[in-house]
Image: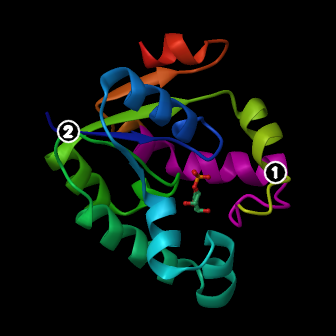
């Protein structure tokens, strides 16, 4: 079976659903952000602070392409879709499942999270603007799942 890529905006529930899906399908799950932290020995926050976003994006692409492509669930960072080459790669090597949640819910989940440098201290308007700038990339997926008011079991099913 080809890889299942779980993507979506920050706070959409990719990690939680990825773990639940992995258990259900008895498949391994890997997360691009965790792989970046493991290989660099730095947190995502440190990478943004010390090296900047472009450096992070280069690492993200490299990590994505080095992960296994079969019988695996891969949860991605929410910005992975902004690079065409990443979307093309994910489509060719697997299916892309987009998790979508209400932006008010997402805002409440992420705006105080200092481990998410892209979201930290941003106003709701700024986050909505960021989301809208990425929307067409997110929609360019194999299947979209709206997670609002659904249990982890329902979403995973
Ligand atoms: C980012 C999302 C983060 C992480 C990094 C950048 C983004 O992952 O990759 O902070 O640009 O949307 P999550 O979507 O898991 O928060």
- Report x, y in % for residue 53: 56, 77
Task: Judge left or right: residue 2 versus residue 98.
Answer: left
How many neighbours does mark 2 have within 10 angstroms: few (below 14), some (14-19), or many (20 or more)? Answer: some
79 to the left or right of 141: right
Q: What quarter of the picture does the N terminus occupy?
A: top left
Dot 1: what SS? loop
Question: Residue furthest toward the bottom?
Answer: 50
Segment colored magenta? 116-138
Which is more toward the observer, 109 or 131?
Answer: 109
Queried whether the magenta region covers residue 131, the answer comes back as yes
**Residue pictured at 53% horizontal, 71% vertical:** 37
For residue 99, which numbered disc appears in the image?
Answer: none
Q: Is residue 93 visible?
A: yes
Q: How is the image coloured?
A: rainbow
Picture coordinates of residue 4, whole percent (x, y)? 29, 37
Image quadrant of ligand 1 equals bottom right
Q: Is residue 78 left or right of residue 75?
A: right
Disc 1 crowd rating (10 Å Cα; few below 14, some 14-19, many 20+) is many
Give the labeled residue for mark 1: 111
């Amino acid at each position: 079976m080809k890889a299942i890529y779980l993507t979506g905006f920050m706070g959409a529930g990719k990690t939680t659903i990825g773990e639940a899906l992995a258990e259900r399908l008895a498949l391994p799950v890997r997360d691009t952000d965790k792989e970046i932290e493991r290989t660099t020995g730095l947190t995502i926050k440190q990478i943004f602070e010390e090296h900047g976003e472009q450096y992070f994006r280069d690492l993200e692409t490299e990590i994505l392409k080095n992960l296994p492509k079969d019988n695996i669930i891969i949860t991605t960072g929410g910005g992975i879709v902004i690079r065409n080459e990443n979307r093309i790669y994910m489509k060719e090597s697997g299916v892309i499942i987009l998790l979508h949640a209400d932006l008010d819910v997402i805002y409440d989940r992420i705006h105080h999270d200092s481990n998410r440098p892209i979201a930290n201290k941003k106003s709701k308007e700024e986050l909505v603007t960021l989301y809208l700038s990425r929307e067409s990339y997110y929609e360019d997926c194999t299947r979209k799942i709206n997670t609002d008011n659904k249990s982890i079991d329902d979403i995973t099913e």
